[in-house]
Image (cartoon, helix red, strand yellow):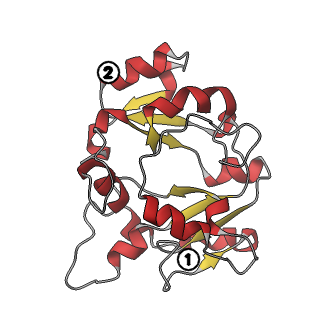
Amino acid sequence: MTHIDNILHIFENGITHKNSQNSNKKFKSIGDNSLINTREDFLLSNKKYLGSYIPFYFGKRTPMLYVIQKGFNGVTATNKEYIVYCVSSVQKIIDLKIPFVYTNGHATNGLSDFYYKDSVNSIEENVDFVAVKKKYWTDENDLDLKRRKEAEFLVESDIPVTAIIAFVVYNDNAKDKLTSLGIDSNLIHIIPKYYF
């Protein structure tokens, strides 16, 4: 998920790291800065920092999206019309030979496990995709549901635009903005139910 103002840079350069030579100098953040800072100092078992990866969620309507839209935890609320899902796939990242890590829950949660390339064939067993696909994450009989819903796919290097298989937006206004940037309308999907 990213702000619509970042899409032109993504369309021209792919999804880039902040330390990349192609980084977006005008990047518009919509995330939780305190969480972003925590990730910067979070060391993985491979001796790399969590903040050095580009994070993706496996699913939609995540708790983080809720925070971004509603403006909790010190995060400024962002209108859903300005939030764009950049969709890729695990297979695309594998085909492009880009290093990655994935988790079975929110990456900064101490209960979450990290898996590397050699475990990708077990991703269906390691990630609880039933939890990932849940519409809501509060369940008094499953207090760990929220953590599992937020399982992540973490990409180590810049992601070329060819790895993006779709852009999901909230409405026609957002789609029109993306098509005005030169993005093929067939790649843009209006799916309001992906938002709160």
Q: Residue at x 74, y 45 (%)?
A: 20
Horizontal and vertical percent position of residue 162? 68, 34
Disc number placed over residue 126 in the picture, else none: 1
The residue at which mark 2 appears reads as 173
**Residue lying farthest to the right in this orientation:** 97
Q: Is residue 105 above or below residue 68?
A: below
Q: Residue at x 73, y 71 (%)?
A: 48
Horizontal and vertical percent position of residue 15? 63, 41
| Mark 2 or mark 1, earlier in chain | 1
| Mark 2 residue type | Asn
Q: Residue at x 31, y 48 (%)?
A: 76
Label 1: few (<14), some (14–19) or many (≥20) C-alpha neighbours in 10 Å:
some
| Mark 1 residue type | Asn
Looking at the image, which is closer to me, 192 or 65? 65
- In this picture, residue 134 sits left or right of residue 113: left
Label 2: few (<14), some (14–19) or many (≥20) C-alpha neighbours in 10 Å:
few
Q: Secondary structure at mark 1?
A: helix
Horizontal and vertical percent position of residue 137? 27, 69
**Residue lying farthest to the left in this orientation:** 140
Quadrant of residue 175 within the rendered picture: top left
| Alpha-carbon span between mark 2 and mark 1 | 38 Å
Horizontal and vertical percent position of residue 128? 45, 73
